[in-house]
Image: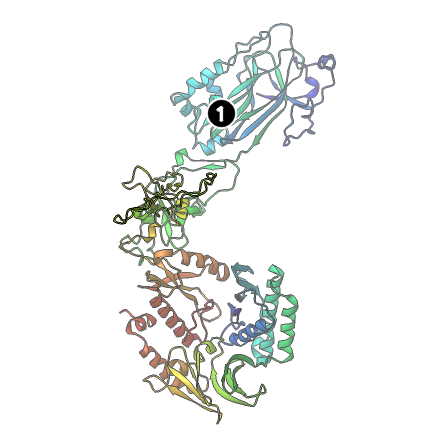
Amino acid sequence: MKTTIRINSTIKNGIGGMEAGFLELIYMHLFNEYSQDFYSHIGINQIDEELDEIILQEGKKIYINIRYPLPENYLETNDEEKNKFSLLVVHEALKRICEYENKLNIRAIEDIYECILNVKFSFEFLCKQFIEKDSGLKVLLVVHPYRTEFKYYLVFQPNSESQHKMYLYSGLPTPFLEQDFFYKPKWKSQNELVIKDRDNEMQFIIDVKSKTYKVENLTRYSNPPSFTKLRTDVSEEQKKQAQLDWQHSLPPAIASIIRQADN
Amino acid sequence: MLRKVPFGRLCGDGKTAVPNFTSATGSSYKNNNGNPPYNTNPSSVVTATSNKLYELAGGSNTTDKVGLGITLRVMSGDTVSIYGKSYWHNTGSSPNNSYSIPVNDLLALLAGTSVVFSAGKGATSGALQGSSGIPTDLSHWIADSVPTVSGKPKAYYNWVLFDEQFRLVSSSSGFHSVGSTSDVIDSFGLAVNITRNGYLYVYCSNESNTPVFFDNFQVIHNHGPLLEENHYYPFGLTMAGISSKAAGKLVNREKFNGGNELQSGEFSDGSGLEMYDANFRMYDAQIGRFHQQDPLSDINEDQSLYSFANNNPVLLNDPLGLDAMTTEPAPLPEVVVTGVRPKPKPKPTPPSPPSVLPARTSPLPVAPSPPPSQTPVPAPAPSPTPEPTPLPPVEVIGTGALGAAGLTVLGVLLPLKAGADFPNGDETYYYKHPYERPSVLNPFVGHGNNKENSNPHIVYQFTFAPKDGGTPVLKYGISDELRNGTNRIQAQLAQLTALYGVTVKPKILQRTLNRQEAIEIERKLVSQHFDIWKRMPREQTRPTPF
C-alpha cells in the first residue's frame, strides 16, 4: 500500500482510538484500488475547540486538524452508527484536503465513501498471495476487518476460482499485523507452505492438501509472545503471560528502558 | 501668550482689517493648506479651513515670543515636513529686534512638554541648564538666527533636534525667517531629514516688537523604516541608555535569543518578570542563566544545567531552551593535500609523414650490402619527442578554512597546480574531499538510514496532555545525534505543536551507539505502547511494533 492513513482524535470518545484501525485499513486498501496514491501518509485528527483547524504538509505527508463535534447521544448509538459517523468525519477531512491541494480526486473520494456505505463496512481485502510455481496453486491471504478485530483467512485457488477458505488468525485492529506475522513465505513442497514472522518467533505451517494449518512456536516460551499478545481469540491470562514472556525475551538493557527502570 | 485671532484681524494693529491685503498678495487669501501649492505632502489636509490665525505679539511680553511648539519622538531615517504661512504688518517704524528669547525660556518650554517628561524621565529646565554643553550649544545655535534682511521682524519657524542624550544635532536643526515684505503672505515648506534618534522640537518665535501671524502651521511626521534600535550586553540585557524606540508603535517584545518574547511589564504595577520565554525554559538576561534545568542535559554533560548557550552568547543562541545552536556558518575543516596522482605518460606519437613526398627516383637506390661477416646494425628509430600535455590553468586555492561554497566544489577532485614548485614537473596534485581523510572520530557519512550507520543516535519521544483519555504519546523517534544534534527534534516539535497545541513536549529517552540499537529500542517502545493502548502512538508511522 502506498498511502498510510492515521485517524486520531483529541476529544473524548472521538473517532480515534483502537477502533480507528478498522477504518484506516479500509481506506488504505481503497485508496490503493482507486489509485489515490499521491500522499505517502495522511493524518486526520478530530479536534475540539481548543486547537486550530489546520492543514499541514510535509513533503508527501499531509496532516489535517478537523473540528467535528460528536452528535448527541453518540455513546448510546450502535457500532454501525458510530462507524458511519467516523466515516463522515474522515470523508469530510479528505474533501478538505482535496480542496486544499487538488492532489486527490474528489470523484474517487466520493466513490470510496459510497462504496463503504453500500457494502456496510464489510470488506475482504487481499493482503498477499503465495503461488506454488509447479502446480500453479495460488494461496491468498485475505483480511476481513471488523471494528474490534481483524480476521485473516487463507483462500486456496487452484484454478483462479476460490475453492476453499480457511480461517487463520484473529488479531487486534491494526493495519500492520500482516507485514509482521506473514512476513516470509516459503513453499516446502507442493503441499506445504510455511509462513514465518519477522522476529522468528513462530511460523504457520499450512497443509494445502488437507486445508489445515498449525502454528509452530520457535521460542522457548509456552507461546510465541508477540503473536499471542496480539491475538483476540485467546484468554486474557494467556495475553498477560505473553506480555511477561515478551518482556523477558528482551535484552536486559532494552527491557530496563522499556520499563523505565533505574538501572 | 499665543493668541488665536479672527481672520478679519489680519492687520497688525489688531483693530482693523488690512484694506489692500488682497491687492498686496495678488489674489484673495484662501485660508487653507492647499494655497499656495507648497504643501504637497499626501498626508496633509489641504481642505482644512479656519477663520482663525495665530499671533505672536512679541515685544516686552516674554510669553508672546515663542509658541505653536510641538515635540516629536523621532528616529533616524524619519522625515518631518513643516509647512506654514506667516504675515506681518509694517506699522511705520522698523521692527525692534532686540527682544531676544532667553535660553531658559526655551528650555522651560522644551522640558515642559509631555513627551520629554515621559521619555526623559522627568527632565526639568533646571536640570537641562545644569548639564554641561547643552545651554552653550543652544546659545550658539540661537545666536546664529539673525535676520539677514533688516527692517523685518526677527521671527522664525524653528526646528531643533536633540539626540537621546539631549545633545543638539545641528545637521537636523534649523530655522526659517518670515517674509521680508510687509503685508505679504509668506509660505514656507520644508522636509527635515532626521539623522539621529531623539526629539525634534518645532516652534515659532518672534523676537521683535512687531506682531507676526502664523497660519496653517503643519508638522507632518513620516516614519522611516527604523522603529527600534536595541543594544545588548553579551548575555542579552538591554543597554537601555543607548537603545531607543519610535513613539506610537506597538511594543516589540520579541528581541534577543532569536526573537524570544521578553516577559516585561505584564503586571498591573508596570513591573514584570523581565525574562525571556525560551519555550522550554525562562531565560534571565540579567544573570545570563536559565531558571530551569536543561531538558536535554544528557547531550551537554559538561555544561551547567542552567547555562545559556554554553556560556558563549556571542557565537551561539538557544531559542528553544534546549540546545545551543550556532548562528554562524560552521568553519569547515582544513583542506589538505592527501595524495599525488602521477601524471599519465604521454603516448609516443609516430612521426608524421612529410606533407610533400620527395620525387621518386627509379630505380630505387640499393643500399650496399654489408659484408657477410658484419651484422647489420639497424638505424636508430627516430625517437618521438613527447609533447607536454597542456596543464590546466593554475587555480589559486588557498589552504585553510573555506567557505560553504568551497566545500561543495571540493567534492570533486580539483587540480591544484603543477610546474616548478613540485619536484617532478610531470605530477599533478589533487585535493581530496576532507571527509575522506582518516579521522579519530571516523563518523559515518553515508545515507542516514543505512543499517551501518555507526554514529551515536538518540531515541526520543513526544508527549502532550490529552483530554480524551487516550495515550499521551505522540510518537517515538530516533535521530543521528552526531549529524543532526537536536535539530530533528526541534523541527518535529514545531509540527506537532501546530497539530496538538502547546502542551507537546519532547524528551530524550536514550542514547545509543549506533542506528541499529536505536531502531531496536524504538521498535520495542512502540510495541510496549501497543500492548498498553492497543494502538500505536498517535503520530507513529514506523517502525511497525512487532
Q: Position of residue A229 (x, y in %)?
A: 41, 81
**In the image, residue A147 above or below residue B512:** below
Q: Is residue A114 left or right of residue B113?
A: right
- In the picture of the structure, the residue carrying the numbered disc 1 is B161
- Residue B259 horizontal/vertical position (percent): 44, 46
How many numbered marks appear? 1
Q: Quadrant of the N terminus of chain B?
A: top right
Q: Residue at x 60, y 59 (%)?
A: A101
Nearest to the observer: residue A104 or residue B525: A104
Residue B439 visible somewhere in the drawing: yes
Neighbor class of circle 1 (other Cα within 10 Å; few <14, some 14-19, many 20+) is: many
Q: Residue furthest bottom?
A: A210
Q: Is residue A124 left or right of residue B378?
A: right
The spot of residue B469 in percent (x, y) is 46, 71
Where A220 falls versus B451 (above or below)? Answer: below
Q: Say which quadrant the C terminus of chain B sits in.
A: bottom left
| Mark 1 element type | strand
Tell which residue pokes out farthest to the left in this image.
B373
Chain ID, mark 1: B
Look at label 1 and name its amino acid: Leu
Q: Position of residue B410 (x, y in %)?
A: 38, 47
Residue B287 seen: no
Give the colour scheme of this rendering: rainbow
The answer to which of B13 and B534 lies nearer the viewer is B534
Which is more toward the observer, A215 or B525? A215
In the depicted structure, whether residue A245 falls above or below residue B375: below
